[in-house]
Image: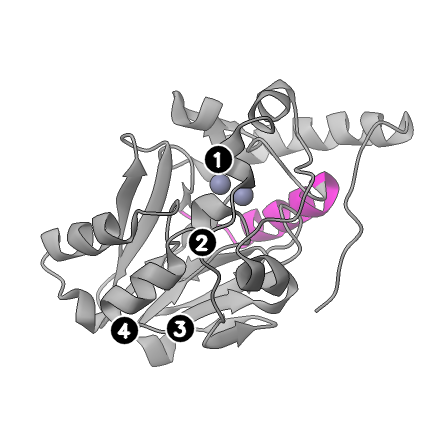
Amino acid sequence: MSRTKVIPIPVLGRHAINAYLLLGRRPVVVDAGTPGSGRRIHDEVARHGVDPADIALIVITHGHIDHFGSAAELHRLTGAPLAAHAADLEPFRTGRARRPYLPTGPMGRLMQRDRRLHVRVEGFEPDLLLRGETSLDDFGIAGRIMPTPGHTAGSVSVLTDEGDLVAGDLVANSFMGLIPGKPANPPFHDDPQGNLASLRAMLALDPRALHVGHGSPLDPARVGRWARREDRRLTRRAAAGRLTVRTRTSA
Ligand SMILES: [Zn+2]
Ligand SMILES: [Zn+2]
């Protein structure tokens, strides 16, 4: 089988917020951007020579509105089923991310005041409710959806058989992509150490590239070095009682 192509779909700026088009035997879309971007994602998919009505599945990586804001709209525009993890079902159904957002640093503390993060978007009901590792074979992609909890309890990533990891907010580029190639935390994590454990579990599978929600693709070796430093930083913060974690909610 030929390699699954991973094509970024810019939702905001050049790569400040990305969705992705995966092209295997059939097309699959990962993430659905901010509210009001369904038409843009639909048109971008068409621009790559894909009939949006052929999209086999839309995978939502997690319950933040810059990733599921247009899920309901894109579902209407394409007819494609939505796949999302049970542990973020409450945000998906209510159209609201869990609050408060828990900042990972100064960027998050600044951003948590942004009104756009606190709006209610159109909710949705997943057609495919994810609970564990899920093969994408039935949807025309040689790859699988992997639960990668921590950023939110219901965060997932898509790993193709060739090693492309579409990682949502598991890791980001510094300053939402303004410093391309430099790994950093996204502005918020519900459980920073849980997220780091998920990231390291994915790196242990030896991916060839990390395609993230915010910024350009990241080199796994560089992310691995960053993750070791981050591990030491989080351990120090936890020991000092300065690590805020949202208690895991089950679904
Ligand atoms: Zn997020
Ligand atoms: Zn995000």
User: Disc 4 versus disc 2: distance between alpha carbons?
Assistant: 16 Å
Residue at position x 48%, y 61% in the image: 123
Residue at the limit of the structure toward the right, as seen here = 240
The answer to which image quadrant residue 2 occupies is bottom left
> Quadrant for ligand 1?
top right
User: Disc 4 versus disc 1: distance between alpha carbons?
Assistant: 27 Å
Q: Pointer 3: what residue?
A: 136
User: Disc 1 versus disc 3: distance between alpha carbons?
Assistant: 33 Å
Are discs 4 and 1 less than 8 Å apart at CB? Answer: no
Q: Pointer 4: what residue?
A: 79
Considering the image in quadrants, where does the C terminus appear?
bottom right
Q: Pointer 1: what residue?
A: 116
User: Is tag 1's residue or tag 3's residue first in the polypeptide sequence?
Assistant: 1
Are discs 3 and 4 less than 8 Å apart at CB? Answer: no
Q: Which amino acid is tagged 4?
A: Gly
Residue at position x 77%, y 55% in the image: 248
Residue 38 in picture, x, y percent from top left = 29, 53
Tell me which segment is drawn in magenta.
Answer: 192-208
| Image position of 44 with respect to 232: above or below | below
User: Disc 2 versus disc 1: distance between alpha carbons?
Assistant: 14 Å
